[in-house]
Structure formats: structure tokens, C-alpha cells
Amino acid sequence: MTSAEVPAHVAIIMDGNGRWAESRGLPRSKGHEMGEKALFDVVEGALEKGIRYLSVYAFSTENWSRPEEEVDFLLGFNRKLLRQRRDDMNERGVRIRRIGRREPVPDEVLDEFTAAEEATANNTRMDLMVCFNYGGRAELEDAAARGSIPEHLYAPDLPDVDLLIRTSGEKRLSNFLLWQSAYAELYFTETLWPYFDRHALWAALEDYAARHRRFGSL
Ligand code: IPE
Ligand code: IPE
Ligand code: MG
């Protein structure tokens, strides 16, 4: 793969944690824990290939409708891993950035994001966009309320998504990066997220490299 064929912005809907756990008779939370290991491997695989922006869907505006126990787990879990992984990310030149609505995310979770953002603010190798309490419609509503949409997206400097990956066999956007994915190449795989790793990412990159993007032209 030549560098010209490497997408600048890869977005991932990390789906299938619950099914991975249920298929093993484990609580859903174990699936989320395994999913974090997959994400860390994917971050390293993305760095190896020179991907500049990696956006990951960690918690959607719709995920509040899950049972309270799971919502609480996900809030605490994300808070914990931001603290645990902050230094690993910093060592690798990764800048962590949260995008999403603040309300009703608890302050202690937002504070952990802020600490991770501040610790990694000067890194330029890759931006890891953690989409948390993120919804594409909420983002567009919030932007439109403030004026021109592209100027008021949560991260106006974020380029369009080149490659959008969704795991677990579901073939839908689930309200992810609606504006930014207008011309994204879509890649769906049956692999459940906890089984995904850098090699699975590279397979998606190979698929992407063979595509012909036309953008409405010829
Ligand atoms: C994705 O896995 C992670 C989050 C939504 C936080 P799921 O929890 O949606 O797993 P499935 O789809 O139930 O298998
Ligand atoms: C999308 O997955 C959200 C995240 C991965 C965080 P979901 O599992 O919540 O999406 P649906 O409900 O299947 O559309
Ligand atoms: Mg799911």
C-alpha cells in the first residue's frame, strides 16, 4: 500500500462487545473490557500505517437508553481507561480529543477527558477522536443553532471521514459522524469488536486502497 492510498481519517463503530460476551456466557461488561484491548491494538496499527485521524464511537446519545447498570459501567469504565491509557497514548504521540454533548455526562467523566486532552494536547502524530455522548443529529443541531454548520461542528478542523468501519455484521450508521461521512467509503465486517485487531484494520485498509472514489465526478 502506498502512502497516498492510506486514508487520512478512519472512523470506527466498535460494535459487538455484548454479543461477544453473551456467546461465552459472560456479562456484557467483559465484552467492553475486551473491546478496549482491541482498540489499543487498533491504535497501534493505525499509527504504524500513518493514519492521521482515528475516530471511535465509544458512547452514543442513544446509549443512555440501555439498562442503568450498563450505562453506569460504561461511564466508570471509560473514566478509568482514560486515566490508565493517557500515558501510553502520550508516549506514542497520540492526541486524545473528546467530541459529543457534555449534558448529561457526569462531571467526573468529563474531567477525566479534560485531563487526557490536556496531557496529550501537544501531540501531532495522530488525533484519537473519542466520540462520547456523541450523536450526529445532536452535533448538527448544535452547530446549526450557532450558525454555519461546518464552522460549528464539535471539531471543525476534523477532515471528512475517508473510511468508515463497522464491526459485528450490522450495516447502519447509528447516528455516527453524519456530516463528516457524507462521502466515506463504508466497510462492514462480521467480526465482533473484541476480536478486531490491527490486522483486521489493515485488511480494511487494503480493501479501501483498491476502491475508486469519484465524489460525483467521472
Ligand atoms: C458496542 O458494543 C459498544 C457500545 C455500544 C458501547 P455493544 O454493547 O453494542 O455490543 P452488542 O451490539 O450488544 O453486541
Ligand atoms: C453504536 O452501536 C454505538 C457505539 C458503538 C458506541 P449500538 O450497538 O449502540 O448501535 P445500534 O443500537 O445497534 O444501532
Ligand atoms: Mg451494538
Image (tube, rainbow, N blue to C red):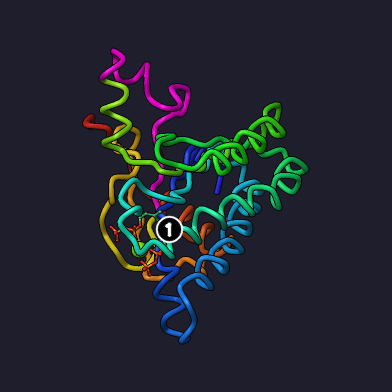
Let me know if residue 6 appears in the view: no
Give the quadrant of residue 168: bottom left
Expressed as whole percent of the image width and height from the top left, the position of residue 164 reads: 38, 48
Q: How many marks?
A: 1
- Magenta span covers which residues? 145-165
Q: Is residue 161 magenta?
A: yes
**In this view, which residue lies farthest toward the top?**
147
Using the image as rendered, state which of residue 102 and residue 68 is in the foreground: 68
Compared with 152, 18 (above or below) is below
* Residue at image coords 43%, 65%: 69
Expressed as whole percent of the image width and height from the top left, the position of residue 198 reads: 58, 60
Q: Is residue 29 magenta?
A: no
Give the quadrant of residue 105: top left
- Quarter containing ligand 2? bottom left
Mark 1 CB within 8 Å of ligand 1: no
Residue that label 1 marks? 71
